[in-house]
Structures are given as structure tokens and as C-alpha cells.
Amino acid sequence: EIMGSEGYLINQFLVSKTNHRTDEYGGEHFGNRMRMALEIVTETRKACGKDFIIIFRLSMLDLVKDGSSWEEIKTLAQALEDAGV
């Protein structure tokens, strides 16, 4: 199980409120902020094989003002599925 829910490191990358990076893992573009989560899933899938069950704990509520929008959550969920969850 990969912990991407509120308060954990991966979620801190996903939410613009907590991600103040200016490189390819940050900024206003959600595609940049979800890059680390997708890379973790992709590499986990490579290491474990196609038949291994991967669970990604996704935060539906960030518990911070101006957290992830519903559109961002749906985008991430689809991208995680496409990456092998």
C-alpha cells in the first residue's frame, strides 16, 4: 500500500498549499505536482510485476484550506489507474 493520503509526504507534493517547489515536481500545474506519485507507482509496478496488487491510499479531503479540488482528485485517480494501480 502506497500512502498518498493527507499529511503524508506524497500528499504534500500533490497539494499546492504545501508544495512550494519551483521545479518539475511543483508549481501551479497539477501534472507537475502529481509527478512523484505517478513515478512511485510506475516504479513499484516495474519492480513487482503486473500481477501484484498495488493499493494507493488517495486523500479525498486534505484537511487544509484550499487543498486539492475535486477535479484534481479525479485526475489523479485516473492517472494512478493508468500507471498501474
Image (tube, rainbow, N blue to C red):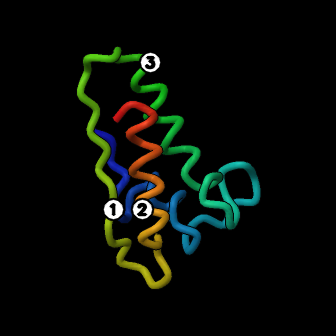
In the rendering, which numbered label is found on residue 73?
2
Q: So how many labels did they put on this image? A: 3
Q: Quadrant of the C terminus?
A: top left
59 with respect to 41 (left or right): left
Residue with the mark numbered 3: 46
Cβ atoms at labels 1 and 3 below 8 Å apart: no
Note whether 68 is above or below 31 in the view shown.
below
Residues at marks 2 and 1 touching, judged by CB atoms closer than 8 Å = yes
Q: Secondary structure at mark 1?
A: loop
Label 2 amino acid?
Ile
Chain-order first, disc 1 or disc 3: 3
Q: Earlier in the sequence, mark 2 or mark 1?
A: 1
Quarter holding residue 5: bottom left
Q: Residue at x 66, y 66 (%)?
A: 20
Q: Residue 52, position in %: x, y?
A: 26, 21
Q: Earlier in the sequence, mark 3 or mark 2?
A: 3
Coordinates of residue 4 in the picture (x, y in percent): 37, 52
Q: Quadrant of the N terminus?
A: top left
Q: Residues within 10 Å of mark 2 (few under 14, many from 20)?
A: some
Q: Amino acid at mark 1?
A: Ser
Residue type at the position of mark 3: Lys
Q: Residues within 10 Å of mark 1 (few under 14, many from 20)?
A: some
Q: Is residue 77 above or below residue 51?
A: below
Q: Residue at x 44, y 18 (%)?
A: 46
Q: Which mark is residue 59?
A: 1
